[in-house]
Image (cartoon, helix red, strand yellow):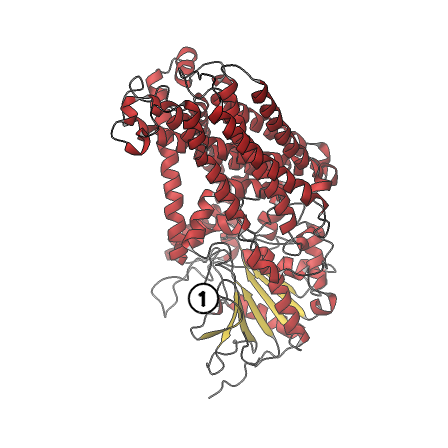
Amino acid sequence: MSGPDISGDVVELRVHGVSGANAEEVLDLRQIAQVAGDRSGGFYRPRPRCSDSVGAHGVTLEAYRWGDLPAGTVARALGLVFLLPFMLVNVTIWMRPANAGSEAMVRSLCRLLALTLTALYVLAIAGVALDLVGWKCLNSSNCLAGRSWLSWLSGRPVGLRLAVLALVPATAIGLIWRISNRPGRPFEAFRAPEQVSGHRLGEVGQWDAEPLVGRLRSIHVAAAFATLDLTLLLARVATGATATGVALTVATAVVLAACVGSLCTPPLIDRAAADRRLDGVTNALRTTAIVLTVLVLAYVLASPRPWDERHGLPGYDTTLAGLFVAQTTLLAALGVVLLRPGNRRRGARPLFGLGALAIAAAGISVAVAYSAGLVFRAADFLDRDVPTAAGIAAGPPRAYTWVIFGFLRAVLITLIVAGLVVAISRRRRRRAAETIVAHDYPNPPAQVRPRLRQVRDAIARARFTEKLVSLAVLFGCLAGLATANTTIGLLGEFPSDLVERNIGLPADAVTFSIAFGSWLIAAIIIGLIVGSVFAYRTIPFRRHVGVLWDLGTFWPRAAHPFAPPCYAERAVPELTRRVTHLVESGHPVLLTGHSHGSVLLAATVLQLPPEVGCRVALLTHGSPLRRLYARLFPAYIDDAALHDIGRRVGWRWVNLWRDTDPIGGWVFSAHRSPPAATDSDPADAVDRRQRDPRDVVTPASDSVPPPIHGHWPDEADEAFTEAVRELVQRLGGRTNPPVAPG
């Protein structure tokens, strides 16, 4: 799309944060035109005849809007809700410590955890279709009464019932396979051809991820079908093994072992995009699993041996508990690797790098909660609130009962600890905030004391962000223990009986809490769905809810192929191409990024050729680069990468930050006074603190005091204007506003 002529020497290219702001908001203008990109991600400028076609600093304003890339439609937003566990586990692989010695092990463990989520996805749907419906409901007259859509299967041979109902999880596998196949293709035209930076952050959006995603997809599809096969075969051989049954079981085990083995060899699975030798192997593995599923269905359908229909689906409860034990073991192994002395020395800052473990455990916990919620709600629907003895036999598998009990316990303990942390740390945070307020507003009049308390409280709340990492790690550990509890279920114990016998709490109270927990999970899922719809439709609501989606989908799919697609694979190369074009056209570029937009610009700068970077300046505000990203992703954002960004733009970099901001912060130095002119390190001059609010006294022209901005963008702030003027001068551009066209 062609655009208007550039009317100023310097182009100020603004990139918004996770709020998903529209172009008018980013430019603070009403009359704009799109000059590049499309409706999902585009570049905008004021219209040529608009009196505001240039900024107040004599520069041409332009905005890059990427908000619709991670969640541009209601359908995509809803998809993100259901793909949330896959997204969280996928992010884990990017949170590994900056230690080359443990990198391969962390990659393997993260990918194995991702594989267990795919198996859990299949087992949850199989639990509803095969166990609850095919095995229990079809043997219960109460369950079948008035349900003609099920009663036609009643009285049929068990093998026929299971073979027909096995098409439900098979269809679910095909659906998620199809969904994961679609998203990457529209972004192919935006992938940059070469890597410029030697830092890993520069790889985000630079590398061709589709070959790796294709290999992972084939492996996960093969494991999904093998999981379904194993569920059917264990039920069939429970009454006696045959040669055919044993052969199919061994073949299924071989397929699963091959999937696990391929994920444990990062040098093979992470081959370069041009090296497609492993693709044939993974495709053959997927094809073998599909053919094997057809054979297993035929075997189940045709086997004449009788079935044991007295209890639940044979082997299902044991398989489910075994999967939870495997997840617990993998989480424990990941924690051991992250706590290795080498990782502590190499700068895994937040709690020795256990942020990765917390996110992995959270992803597992969410997946388990989804699965348990699905099975419990399906059981309630089929039971029609009939007592268990007259309903569908034993109801949901015992493993899910233990999981919900553990999930509820993890949530309650985390909330209690969070309350204690808030109470204990409040005095210290307020004391630090009072020092800042006293420095910023010396000798205030007595009538502004209520406003001073509001500012103090805003600063104190903003400083609580550092505590959230500890709470996330705590929840992750408790969630891991929740899955470990399922091993008790293998002994035939229920939580209510065990708690009553050892603690004395009435069994009915524990049973009620588990039922409450299942409904709580359902309410959370419904809340996420409603939130995703409102986040898409209303920008203010999205500023809070959409943060999780935008941050999670920034990272490419390297652990789970069913995670939502990475928008950085388009956004970063697209920004790189646009900046390169502008510079080559003779126009220096001032890049301004708010919040997560500063992360996109950091990756962009690392991909710019040196001849382009020397004509670029960088202005960040509300940036989480140091405060969050450098702590959570130490292998990708560290001091070396941040200093390289500064060198690439000739240290024409200003970072504005506020004490009231709970997300953004300083990048190199937390100084609260302007740096001395004699400072030799140019990094010391990057960070500039903004006093927020500007004043606590109500101006004579207003009825309320200046607002507290916190994390909101500050393009209209005087400090922002001064920083733009300074950077434009350092780029060699003009700063006096030109005469507006008539």
Local crowd size for mark 1, using a 10 Å CA cut-off: few (<14), some (14–19), many (≥20):
some
Under circle 1, the secondary element is: helix
Q: Position of residue 266 (x, y in %)?
A: 70, 40
User: Is 185 positioned to the left or the right of 27 in the image?
Assistant: right
Please, which residue is most extreme toward the top here?
Answer: 501
Q: Position of residue 126 (x, y in %)?
A: 45, 31
Q: Position of residue 35 (x, y in %)?
A: 53, 73
Please, which residue is most extreme toward the left here?
Answer: 146
Taking the spot 52% from the left edge, 49% from the top edge, the residue there is 435
Determine whether 539 is above or below 360 in the image.
Answer: below
Residue 330 occupies quadrant? top right
Can residue 70 be seen?
yes
Q: Position of residue 91 (x, y in %)?
A: 58, 44
Determine whether 46 is above or below 637 in the image.
Answer: below
The amino acid on which the numbered mark 1 sits, given as a three-letter code, is Glu
Tell which of 98 and 304 is nearer to you: 304
Determine whether 202 is above or below 508 in the image.
Answer: below
User: Is 214 positioned to the left or the right of 120 in the image?
Assistant: right
Classify the position of the N terminus by image quarter: bottom right
Residue 92 occupies quadrant? top right
Q: Which residue is mark 1?
A: 25
User: Is 280 positioned to the left or the right of 55 in the image?
Assistant: right
Tell which of 726 and 193 is nearer to you: 193
Taking the spot 54% from the left edge, 35% from the top edge, the residue there is 224
